[in-house]
Amino acid sequence: MTRRIAVPVLLVVACVAIVLAVVVGYVRRAAVDSDQFANRAAVVLRDDDVRSLIAERVTDQLVLKEQADLIAARPLIESVVSSVVGGRAFTGAFRSAVRDVHSGVFDRDEDTVILTVGDIGTIVAAGLEVVQPSLARRVRTTNRVELVRRRVGTVGAEAARVADTIKVLAWLFLIVAIAAAAGAIALSRDRRHTVVRLGVGTAIGGVVLLLALGIGRSLLVQHLDSPDARDAAGAVWDAFLGDLGTAAWILAGAGAVVAAAAASLIRPVELDEPLRRAGRWVTTQPTRPAGRVVRGVVLVAVGLLLLLDRDLVLQLLFTAAGVYLIYAGISAVLWVVYQPQAARREQAAVAGVGRTLVVAAIAVVLIVAAVGIFVGSGGTSTAAPASGTCEGSEQLCDRPLDEVALPATHNSMSVPLPGWFSSEQDAPIASQLQDGIRGLLIDTHYADRLPDGKLRTYVGDPAELRRQASADGVSPEAIDAALRIRERIGFSGEGTRGIYLCHSFCELGGTTLDSVLGDLHDFLVANPDAVVVVINQDYITPEDFVAAVEKAGLGDLVYRGPTARGKWPTLRRMIDTNQRVVFLAENHAGAAPWYHLAYDTITEETPYAFSKPQQLTDPERLPASCRPNRGPEGAPMFLVNHWITTDPIPLPSNAAKVNAYRPLMRRLRVCRKMRHHLPNLVAVNFYRRGDLFRAVDTLNGIK
């Protein structure tokens, strides 16, 4: 009597434990892990209804809350927002926001959930720039938009405790399932029949789980009013629980196959013969007219299916093949369980508990293995939304930064803007970035803006000013000319101290550091596949530079990883982690762990004092142009300085000569061979003259 009660109870426990192990394991992977949770949330943005609802919410925040005067432009803004939501820039910002909220609940025990998407103004402004630039400038000022605010009270603390428990429960349920199944088989008089019931119970558990998921989805969407909201809620459910439904199907199928295989051991069923009969039926013409008609109709239907839905046919074929292989494998293993009646009587006395435990473990593990393969192959994992290309090419995604060539500009801030007396580049930094420049060589100075709008470089010692300018490659004649300008009327009196990008003398031109860092921030937000390296020839304190970077909103985008050779991450990794701008200092780094000295251990370079084009184009003079200058040999980053200095007037015609494809590639190849290093930064003047981008593509092996 005890045995008759114990066996069914243990089977029920085993089947329930198997289902719970699957559910808890799925929850652990898909819901407790912050990255996986954020990935699934980002996947939801692919649904049109979800995008529409978010676009409406973002527009309300932008128009009604932040920029109420734009109410008349609401339809246009909402249209642009709808196209932006789901794009790479918005998806990246949304994913980061969800991940932060999830960490806040599970790790920081916050009692209020606030889903805030940062840089939304910049992202939307990028879309508005084409259709309405004036609106883009106004919307750009909006930094963050709050999509969701919910007070959760003590749920955060409870969630953290549940997360810790879930990490243990999946293994615990699996152990319970194996132990209960082993006990049931050990106590059973007919082990084959017990295995059949174990398979049937598992299949029923998978079906019950499917029904529960279906009912839960229906209850979720039914209480919502609008069809769009219901569709959006369904999309959210599918993104987070759709894979659990797949796991339930696999569990039910595996249980059914185990039951069928075990049951067939009474009279083992060979599938080979039915398959051979089916093959003969396809290839042999029936003798009866009715049979011919049926065969013809079936063949036509199969032919149409092959033509109209090849993916479905492949799915059916692979599914059938998988079921057959599982059936054949399980049948072979379960022959260990099956014995004819006479043999069972003869060996009943010697059958041991050890063999029973093995049989039970095999039966349970075969069922769980099917789900385990699904989980292990990524069935419960959702990849982060594809970032697309890396710097415009998929070929670069798997390369670390120190194995990628980037186009760069020397004195990037020296551009034809008001207040600049000469320039060394064709366009401002914002345009350089849009054109494809990914390396910026800048100079930062303190300067006083005088009442008449002019700038006066702040330097305590005039001799130090001369030394700095000389080290920057400025000729003595140019230094004397700048000092004469400095002494003229109009460069005296009290001014407002600030930080500017200037080429040695702000009297000859300067741009505020804040504006350039703001342009860099906006570009990186709007172009989530871009990676930029900035080398700062710094005459300001590290503390002031770091503060300016943080103020511009770049603190979340700086690269914070290792900088040793061979330790740099791939471009894909930098993009996925949103660490896409590297800041290096020439003189004084620090104040933040991500602000490193350029020429201490990270960067080696070529000379940069060239006054004639022949120095960079004559093949016999190229080895001298590639010799080591600053930085240690074997540093991970290699900077090739490739410009002609003709102070006080830079000449674009010189840039056209040295930036032409053939002479530029000739020098890059010589430098690469001599220095045993791919040029990572190719820095030029007047970057639009010549073939800088084509040469860099050649270095990267991109056609």
Image (spheres, rainbow, N blue to C red):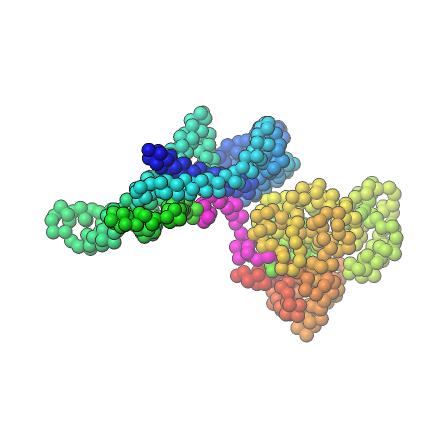
Numbered circles on residues, count? 0
Q: Where is residue 333 in the image (x, y as percent from the top left)?
A: 34, 51
The one nearer the camera, 590 or 76, is 590
Q: What stretch is highlighted in magenta?
A: 374-402
Q: Quadrant of the N terminus?
A: top left
Q: Does the magenta-highlighted stretch encompass residue 386?
A: yes
Residue 592 drawn at (x, y percent): 72, 47
Residue furthest toward the left? 288
- Examine the rendered structure and indicate whether residue 587 appears above or below residue 29: below
Examine the rendering and report whether any part of residue 562 can be seen: yes
Residue at (57%, 61%) from the top-left corner?
700
Residue 32 versus residue 698: which sits nearer the camera? 32
Q: Is residue 24 above or below residue 625?
A: above
Q: Would you say residue 138 is visible in this rendering?
A: no
At horizontal 66% and vertical 65% (from top left) the residue drawn is: 658
Residue depicted at 70% across the width and 60% down the height: 603
Residue 678 drawn at (x, y percent)? 62, 64
Horizontal side, residue 532 vs residue 5: left or right: right
Asked whether, in this view, residue 498 is left or right of residue 245, the answer is right
Figure check: 539 above or below 184: below
Q: In this view of the protein, which residue sits in the foreground, 86 or 569?
A: 569
Chief secondary structure of the magenta span?
A: loop
Q: Which residue lies furthest to the bottom in this view?
A: 620
Q: Which of 277 and 615 is in front in this view?
A: 277
Q: Residue at x 60, y 50 (%)?
A: 574
Q: Residue 381: x and y, percent? A: 48, 45
Q: Does the magenta stretch include residue 49?
A: no
The residue positioned farthest toward the front in the image shown: 349
